[in-house]
Amino acid sequence: MTENTRQTSDEAASAASEVLRDPKATEEEKQAAGSALSQTPSKVDPDE
């Protein structure tokens, strides 16, 4: 299996977060937002 190297920008991740918190967002919008966030690099330092 190959490693996924695609990453979502901070701006796109922020927009996706807003969609997930929007009670009026459709299921399709939430799925797309979740997909975008799954490609966002972790902000946690793995050495800590």
Image (cartoon, rainbow, N blue to C red):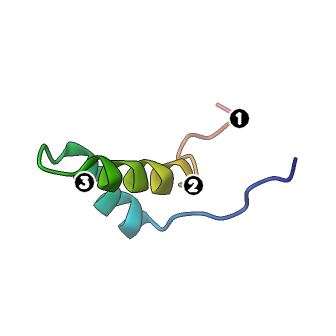
Which residue is labeled 3 in the image? 19
- What kind of element bears circle 3? helix
Mark number displayed over residue 39 = 2
Determine the residue located farthest toward the right in the rendered image.
1
Residue under the point 47% across and 57% down: 36
Residue under the point 13% across and 43% down: 23
> Which of 48/6 is in front?
6
* Mark 3 closeness class: few <14, some 14–19, many ≥20 residues within 10 Å: some
Q: Rounded to the nearest whole Å, what is the CA distance between mark 2 and mark 3?
A: 16 Å
Q: Position of residue 21 (x, y in %)?
A: 20, 44
Q: Rounded to the nearest whole Å, what is the CA distance between mark 2 and mark 1?
A: 21 Å
Residue under the point 31% across and 56% down: 29
Q: Amino acid at mark 1?
A: Asp
Q: Position of residue 6 (x, y in %)?
A: 66, 65
Q: Position of residue 25 (x, y in %)?
A: 19, 51
Q: Is residue 45 left or right of residue 20?
A: right
Q: Is residue 24 left or right of residue 33?
A: left
Q: Position of residue 45 (x, y in %)?
A: 62, 40
Q: Is residue 13 above or below residue 22?
A: below
Q: Is residue 18 left or right of residue 41?
A: left
* Mark 1 closeness class: few <14, some 14–19, many ≥20 residues within 10 Å: few
- What kind of element bears circle 1? loop
* Mark 2 closeness class: few <14, some 14–19, many ≥20 residues within 10 Å: some
Observer-side mark, 1 or 3, equals: 3
Q: Amino acid at mark 3?
A: Val
Which residue is labeled 1 in the image? 47
Observer-side mark, 2 or 1, equals: 2
| Upstream in sequence: badge 2 or badge 1 | 2
Q: Are marks 2 and 1 in contact (CB under 8 Å)?
A: no
